[in-house]
Amino acid sequence: MQCPKCPGTLEEKTYGRKITVHRCSDCGGLWCKPDVLLEMKKEWMSEAVLDSGDPKLGEALDQLDDIKCPEDGTLMEKVADERQIHIWYESCPTCDGMFFDAGEFTDLKYDTLMDRVRGFVKGRRPEG
Ligand SMILES: [Zn+2]
Ligand SMILES: [Zn+2]
């Protein structure tokens, strides 16, 4: 598949038994479906293996609008993550595919971990 954001090609990458995503050979962007994203969030170190692109390049490409779905050509919608609204990714209304710029998945996963740590610390803070 053709990368929706650059001239690169989306190549199939697998991690463990349940995870298959497509990663751009040039910009490192990740293309996946919501069920796979859930597995990626659960899988230890999946971000280090799969989200190996340059976050600076990802940030630059995050500014691009009017991205077309690599599978069906539908104009994709920019959506903010419901828990981390600073993270914007593209979502296809036709096939539910999602595109994360390089570094975005790591951000998504890392913040989820940090939120848990924060909750833990807060819970242990002494009264008064
Ligand atoms: Zn690309
Ligand atoms: Zn689509």
Image (tube, rainbow, N blue to C red):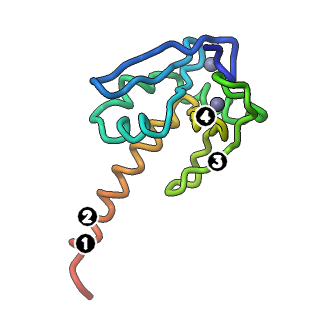
User: Which residue lies under the disc numbered 1?
Assistant: 123
Residue 30's place in the image compared with 115, above or below, is above
Dot 4 falls on a residue whose secondary structure is loop
Tell me the quarter of the picture where residue 1 sits. Answer: top right
Q: Residue at x 61, y 25 (%)?
A: 57
In 3D space, how far apart are the residues under numbered discs 3 and 1 (Cα atoms)? Answer: 32 Å
Q: Which amino acid type is shown beneath numbered disc 3? A: Val
Residue in front for this viewpoint, 51 or 10: 10
Q: Which one is earlier in the sequence, the residue at label 4 or at label 1?
A: 4
Compared across the picture, whether 110 is left or right of 32 comes to left
Q: Residue at x 61, y 44 (%)?
A: 88
Dot 3 falls on a residue whose secondary structure is strand
Q: Which amino acid type is shown beneath numbered disc 4? A: Cys
Q: Badges 2 and 1: C-beta atoms under 8 Å apart? A: yes
The circle drawn on residue 95 is 4
In 3D space, how far apart are the residues under numbered discs 2 and 1 (Cα atoms)? Answer: 5 Å
Residue 33's place in the image compared with 22, above or below, is below
Q: Which one is earlier in the sequence, the residue at label 2 or at label 4?
A: 4
Q: Badges 2 and 4: C-beta atoms under 8 Å apart? A: no
